[in-house]
Image (cartoon, rainbow, N blue to C red):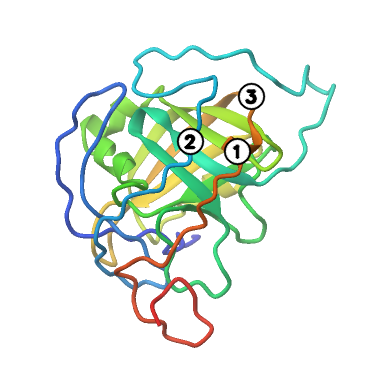
Amino acid sequence: MRRLPSIIRPVARLSGPLLSLVPALLAGAGVCLIVAGLFYYLQPVAAESSATASAGPSGPIAVYSLPPLKSPGPSGSAKIQAAIATRIEVPALGIDLPIVTSPPNEQFPLCNVAEYLSLDKIFAYPGLPQATYLYAHAQKGMFLPLLTASQVNGGDAMIGMWAEVYTDDNQRHIYEITEVIRGLSDTSSSLDKPLGATTDQLWLQTSEGPSEKSTKLQVVAQPIGVLAASQTDAHPPGKGNVCPGAPTCKTSTASGCRR
């Protein structure tokens, strides 16, 4: 069995009720994420918003209407080019984060960004016949709303919400959330489905508790269209920062930790 990488670790406090169902506006406080089987507590950090006005879904709204699509055309008429993911939004939940690659020798993931999974290959090319797999701290301003929403009726309110992934070729890939998977074990084969995907899919991951044995949350979404995006929208300025509660670096070459 494949071991789920220890990339998402939560923090202690979670507070605040679910304020509405669809769209959900959620409040809470910090959950953190960590690499290498360690667990630490973080203070809530507000995410930097770089969104600009554009056509398309925006929260809070209850019924979504898709703007005219810009797609590669009928099947076989054009090939979608590989373009790296740069920004993730879940408008109904207020999630809006730059997407970055993990820095070399990362000991502790960065705050105020989402990161993409990179194993034998990079899982961050929306539109290609593979999964795009993103993870972030379950912390205020990051992926905490996913965790909070999942704790109400198994996350049913998230089904049908839109997730939007921008790419560096100024495209906006629109996905619809179709599945919420809770209680995933760190020792299960939880990555088998996304890593084995042969169609365009979006997977978002965060954690559900504060200990080494904490389970994971996955949110799965399917593509419904591609829109043009502005250079500004597709290239947010945030690159992440070392989390205030990150552990002290263990080695001189480690990154994402405090020195």
Name the residue: 67% across, 35% down.
Answer: 170
Are the residues at dot 2 and dot 3 in contact (C-beta closer than 8 Å)? no
| Amino acid residing under circle 3 | Leu
Residue 199 appearing in the image: no
Farthest residue, direction right:
77
> Horizontal and vertical percent for residue 160?
41, 22
- Picture quarter containing residue 119? bottom right
- Tell me the element at label 3: strand
Q: Earlier in the sequence, mark 2 or mark 3?
A: 2
Label 1 vs label 3: CA separation? 14 Å
Mark 3 closeness class: few <14, some 14–19, many ≥20 residues within 10 Å: some
Q: Which residue is mark 3?
A: 227
Label 2 vs label 3: CA separation? 16 Å
Q: Which mark is residue 232?
A: 1
> Horizontal and vertical percent for residue 259?
40, 83
Label 1 vs label 2: CA separation? 9 Å
Q: Nearer the viewer, mark 2 or mark 3?
A: 2
- Vertical order, 250 against 243 (above or below): below
Name the residue: 61% across, 50% down.
Answer: 123
| Amino acid residing under circle 2 | Ala
Mark 1 closeness class: few <14, some 14–19, many ≥20 residues within 10 Å: few
- Picture quarter containing residue 243? bottom left
Residue 141 appearing in the image: yes
Mark 2 closeness class: few <14, some 14–19, many ≥20 residues within 10 Å: some
